Image (spheres, rainbow, N blue to C red):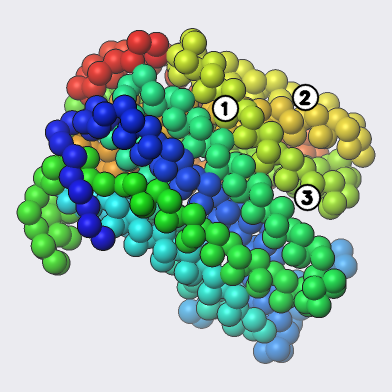
Amino acid sequence: MSEPTVQPSPGVALDETARRRDQRAWCWYDWANSVFPTSIITVFLSLYLTTVARNDALAAGQPCLTRNALVHCNISLFGWAFPAGSLFDYLLAASTLLQVLVLPLTGAIADRTQHKRRMLGLFAFTGAGATALLALVTGTNWRLGVVLFMVATTGYYASVVIYYSVLPEIATADERDGLSSRGWAFGYLGGGIALAVNLATYLGRDVLGLSESAAVRVCFVTAGLWWAAFSLIPLSRMRSYQSPQGSERGLSVLTGGFRQLFGTLRDTRSYPLTLAFLAAYLIYADGIGTVASVAGQYGDLELGLASSTLISTILMVQFVAFVGALLHGWVARRIGAKRTILASLLGWIGVIVAAYFIQAGDELQFYAVAVGIGLVLGGTSALSRSLFSQLVPAGKEAEYFSVYEIGEQATSTVGPILFGVIGAATGSFRPAILALVVFFLIGFGLVLLVPVRRAIRAAGNTEPVIV
């Protein structure tokens, strides 16, 4: 892959026409990769992998219990026995631990070598390939699924770090909120369309002559091909926008990356306001992630809604979030990213309070709250991404965004644990869902206290006209 170099400064080195072309191409990676968290993680893989693991336990003669019409069996890995139903939860935790090791070094190497195009292509195609190969997971070989999922998630998160780090290199300070919002909106639209195609394949499997297992495996292949094919669009325009910070070659790139990483970790103390915003983001991002992950559980166990209602809600939220992200970008251009994020956090509080009062079995009320979630879901994250890019020192973008991604994953367990503990203690998920308001209240207070303009100046960046 050749990498034409544009000098000297990121975001303003290109003329406006070239910059706009690069920005349009950049948004396509949101479209490309959204199929993985939406179709694979959220919908298909967890139940499929659990079924394969349970089949293995039954084939091995493991003792199983039937509870609530479901079969619960133990499986083992490296001598450790645990319920098959817990496999995917443990897998997500293990993936997070792996990213803690991989992403910082990935970011450091990307910043040091500036081979971001090559690295994005490597991680995107590796993740997409591993996703498609999940189709080989059949019968009882769930361990293959574990390995492929770990490879796919590493490819996904590493490519996202590289992708995020390009944002300040192709957009001026005043363009970033709009560009990030368009990218996020585009991602929800692409993820929604891909999910609709996969659900149509799964639900129409009898017409297509497919078994349930075969239909899911077709969805794995479709998702991998979608991710890989649409990744070609951003890669076709991507280039090196900054000079390399080192001249290492081969394995010496790793040692150079470690030096770069340790130097950046020492320097983070010089940017306390950047870290303050990051801390605020991680708190309310945990709230966002928890609401998204437990909404189905709340609708099922507390409200008694049908699975068809929950599936259609997932699809609907994708398309509403497309509108919501664009709306956030439009508002941010007028009142600034910080004020828009604060307004969005208030919107989250309103949505959660409304969810608390949904009557059991009332689909219309559930859909209305889901629309509210969709309107704030993508926009909050999109503007957080663009605002954080303003607070990152030039040349350190990938490293800081690796911390951004790792922090988001590492703190993502607090909300679900709180939700589960309160639900178990009270016997109802209503107080549990209401308790999630605390994440948005704390996040609101911390964001309010961050002097964003001073933080941008401290990072050595140009201030946008409206923050």
Point out the tag, 2 or 1, that comes first from the N-terminus.
Answer: 1
User: To which quarter of the image does residue 367 belong?
Assistant: top right
Which residue is at 75% across, 47% downward? Answer: 297
Residue type (three-letter) at the residue carrying disc 1: Leu
Name the element at disc 2. helix
Residue type (three-letter) at the residue carrying disc 2: Ala
User: Can you identify the residue that label 1 sits on?
Assistant: 326
Farthest residue in the front direction? 17
Question: Quick one: 461 or 414, which is closer to the camera?
Answer: 461
Point out residue 64 in the picture as x, y percentages from the top left corner. 76, 78
Position of residue 192 relative to residue 206, above or below, is: above
Name the element at disc 1. helix
Gap in angstroms between the C-alphas marked 2 and 3: 20 Å
Point out the tag, 2 or 3, that comes first from the N-terminus.
Answer: 3
**Disc sitting over residue 354 in the figure:** 2
Point out residue 329 in the picture as x, y percentages from the top left corner. 52, 23
Which residue is at 12% across, 55% downward? Answer: 256
Neighbour tally class for label 1: few under 14, some 14-19, many 20 plus, Cα within 10 Å: many
Position of residue 291 relative to residue 439, above or below, is: below
Residue type (three-letter) at the residue carrying disc 3: Ile
Check contact, mark 2 vs mark 3: CB within 8 A.
no
**Disc sitting over residue 311 in the figure:** 3
Gap in angstroms between the C-alphas marked 2 and 1: 24 Å
User: To which quarter of the image does residue 275 belong?
Assistant: top left
Gap in angstroms between the C-alphas marked 1 and 3: 24 Å
Point out residue 24 in the picture as x, y percentages from the top left corner. 43, 38
Seen in the image, is 235 located left or right of residue 66?
Answer: left
Check contact, mark 1 vs mark 3: CB within 8 A.
no
Check contact, mark 2 vs mark 1: CB within 8 A.
no
